[in-house]
Image (tube, helix red, strand yellow):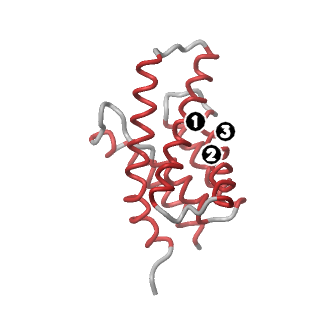
Amino acid sequence: MKNWIFLFIIITCVLLQITILDYIKILNVKPDLLMVSVVFVSIFLGVRQALFFSIFAGILKDALSINAFGINTLLFPLSSFLIINLSKKVSLDNNLIRMASVFIIMLINDVITRLIFLFLGNFISWGIFLRTAFMESLYTAFILPLVFKIIKPVVYPVR
């Protein structure tokens, strides 16, 4: 039953990402709700389920973005695996630790994506890249507690 809830959450995040979040950009950057959903499933589900939902979220993001197809399908499960391993060593119960983890993972994700683009011949100036990567990571990290506060009662209702 909960698997349907997680699918619904990921699809809702996709819809919000491509519609409403376009209106609340800061410096032409919006938070990555799909990465937040990957963090959520990585913290609260088992490894197999988290990797499945991460691949699903990556495929959806690749299908709806202008990036080369497959980048997010590869990077989301890697991020999920990183979060799962990090949660075994560090408790991710605190919002500040979650926010710092998401910030670092988003920066790593953006750097790898930009390096792939550079390898493919698509050059982006380092100033624009650093500003965009930093702001997107920061924005996603700051929105994480709000999204967790909304999603957690849906997945784990109080009885």
Residue at image mark 3: 74
Quadrant in which the N terminus is drawn: bottom right
Could you tell me which residue is drawn at 51 percent across and 54 percent down? 37
CB atoms of marks 3 and 1 within 8 Å = no
Q: Position of residue 151 (x, y in %)?
A: 44, 65
The residues bearing labels 3 and 2 have C-alpha atoms spaced at a distance of: 9 Å
Q: Which mark is residue 79?
A: 2
Could you tell me which residue is drawn at 60 percent across and 30 percent down? 112
SS of the residue under disc 3 = helix
Q: Amino acid at mark 1?
A: Ile
Could you tell me which residue is drawn at 47 percent across and 17 percent down? 126
Q: Amino acid at mark 3?
A: Leu
- Front residue (pair 129, 9): 129
Along the horizontal axis of the image, is 8 left or right of 27?
A: right
Front: mark 1 or 2: 1
Tell me the crowding category of disc 1: few under 14, some 14 to 19, or many 20 or more residues within 10 angstroms, Cα based: some
Residue at image mark 1: 108
